[in-house]
Image: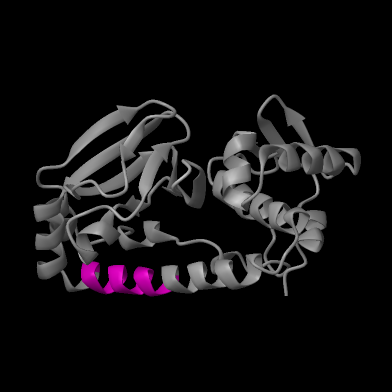
Amino acid sequence: MSIKGIFPIDKWDFKSESILVDLPSQDFDLLMTHSNEKLYKKNEILFREGTYAAGIFFIVEGKVKKYKVDEEGNEQIIYLAHKGQLIGYHGILSGDHYLDSVGVLEDSRIVFISKDDFLRTLERSPIFSSRLLKTLSHEYTVLTNSLTVLAHKTVRERLALQLVVIREKYKMAGTEGMPIELNISREDLANLVGTVRENIVRILSEFKEDNILETKGRKIIIKDVSKLVQIANFK
């Protein structure tokens, strides 16, 4: 089921994959001059906050989480990135160090692009620089929206909203007409919603009883996304 018309997903998705779509071949080749593709296993770390920003990363297949860690070691997930998206460029644009940490959520193929190649392409390609600037502007809107809206919602509403957003990310790899499975741990869900794992487990059980979703181990299958949109109480 499409959520078009009932939920403004564009306000919740960074969509940085648009940066490279149909990018002129000479610009794409310049960006990938010294690139290196690697297979990352689930739970591997791409980079940690505060480390030297040696380059950016392009997700060919898979999903990752961007997060920050507080003084007590607790994670707060900022965003889930997926196939086609670029990550890591904020650190290079703002200085020499990554501004957050990135961990792999599932086995993924990811290309590393050196800092020099990224900056060279940014300098020589008006299309690439224009798209990146547009994406940065949109990201600011998404993050501002998230902060202002989520601060005034209950845990139940926040979880429903995030399940809707995550569903759209996993929908990309799904087959038309088939149920969409969200493969995400309860711990990561809690860190994304901003609560404890126990709350996530309890509310998911309530959603399951209401026939909104079903679970298979850590997988969550959304059965009634329109009901989740209603619970999210997004206005």
Q: Residue at x 36, y 46 (%)?
A: 101
Magenta region, residue range: 128-138
Q: Give residue 99's position: percent from left, percent from top.
A: 31, 56
Q: Nearer the viewer, residue 73 or 29?
A: 73
Q: State the count of labels.
A: 0
Is 131 covered by the magenta stretch?
A: yes
Write down the quadrant of residue 94 in the picture. bottom left
Q: Give left or right: position of 164 versus 28.
A: right
Q: Going by the image, does 80 lie left or right of 46? A: right
Looking at the rendering, in which quadrant would you find the C terminus?
A: bottom right
Residue 183: tell me if it is visible. Answer: no
Q: Which of the 4 image quarters holds residue 47?
A: top left
Please state the horizontal and vertical placement of residue 23, each as a whole percent of the image.
25, 61
Query: Between residues 200 and 73, which one lies in front from this camera angle?
Result: 73
In the displayed structure, 2 sits above or below 174; it is below
Q: Main secondary structure of the magenta part?
A: helix
Is any part of residue 19 visible from this angle?
A: yes
Answer above or below: position of 235 versus 198. below
Residue in the foreground of this view, choosing between 14 and 156:
156
The colouring scheme, among rainbow, by chain, secondary structure or one colour, is: one colour
Residue 209's spot in the image, x, y percent? Answer: 90, 38
Which residue is painted at 38% across and 43% down in the image? 102
Where residue 22 appears, as percent x and y from the top left, is 30, 60
Q: Residue at left 34%, top 29%?
A: 40
Q: Is residue 188 magenta?
A: no
Q: Residue at x 64, y 70 (%)?
A: 149
For the residue pair 50 and 140, the one nearer the viewer reads as 50
